[in-house]
Amino acid sequence: MMLAHTCLLLLLCFAHLPASSLALPFEQRGFWDFAMDSDVGGMMSMMKDEEEGSATEELPSPEIPTCPFGCQCQLKVVQCSDLGLMEVPKGIPADTKLLDLQNNRITELKENDFKGLANLYALSLVNNKISKVHPKAFVPLKHMQKLYFSRNLLTGIPKNLPPSLVELRIHENHIKKVHEGAFSGLGSMNCIEMGGNPIQNSGFEPGAFKGLKLNYLRIAEAQLTGVPKDLPDSLHELHLDHNQIQAIELEDLSRYKHLYRYSGLFP
């Protein structure tokens, strides 16, 4: 009950934020920042209902629940933050919806780190030391919608991100290049936050954003001198603040018919 109440409070707080605050980079100060949207709120209610409803049914003897050493596991939430972990822990329950691995010392994501976690909805890897991601690391995560990967040591966009992904937060890494097709197959993606990376305009290859239907894109605090070319024409918000942009041409933004919020003319 307390967990669901916490989710509700966060949702209400977020709903009353001033519009200007939405341009700021995402700051995950606590694990329940996962719950800052109605989808997760509904999911938490669903999980609560499942548990309450099961009390009236005859069930077979329950299996002994598993939980990685040092982590906290309840209501399909696994919290393993601030433990000094060097790798993704073993024994994560298969029904996990939310997995918090932030503020650890993980350096690499291996092929089978997330094996069996097909039900995962959101994953936080914020503030680790990850520089290597196996090309198949995210393949088991067939229903994941939110990936928080900020404050790591990535030099590029990880390969084979789940097609179900809606939100990618990958700011404050070491990304200098976004290759053609880097987001291929991610037609459900709605939001990308990749500010704080040392990327220049030349770092975006032609076709880097091909196939995306983004509403929100933020590439602030980078090394841009102009609006990157060929961004998704579906954009509603584009934030390029704190770059080296001194001027923009009308044609730089005229193709974005749905754009209603832009920031970033001057450094």
Image (spheres, rainbow, N blue to C red):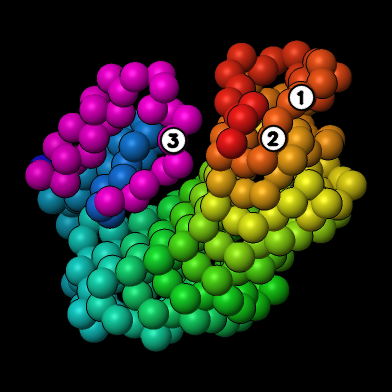
Question: Crowding at label 2, few (<14), some or many (≥20) Cα neighbours within 10 Å?
Answer: some
Secondary structure beneath label 1 = loop
State the residue position of label 1: 248
- Dot 3 corresponds to which residue? 24
For residue 245, the mark is 2
- In space, the residues marked 2 and 1 are separated at their CA atoms by 8 Å
Question: 40 or 13, which lies in front?
Answer: 13
Position of the N terminus by quadrant: top left
Local crowd size for mark 3, using a 10 Å CA cut-off: few (<14), some (14–19), many (≥20): few
Residue 73 visible in the picture: yes
Measure the C-alpha gap from mark 1 to mark 3.
Answer: 22 Å
Give the magenta-colored segment's residue range.
2-29
x, y percentage for residue 93?
A: 35, 71
Residue at the extreme left of the image, as rendered: 2
Closest to the camera, between mark 2 and mark 3, is 2
The disc labelled 3 sits on which kind of residue? Leu
- Residue 13 part of the magenta-drawn span: yes
From the top left corner, tell me how far across and down residue 52 is, in percent.
16, 45
- Please state if 267 lies on the left or on the right of 86 as rendered: right
Q: Main secondary structure of the magenta part?
A: helix
Q: Give coordinates of residue 4: x percent, y percent.
A: 18, 40
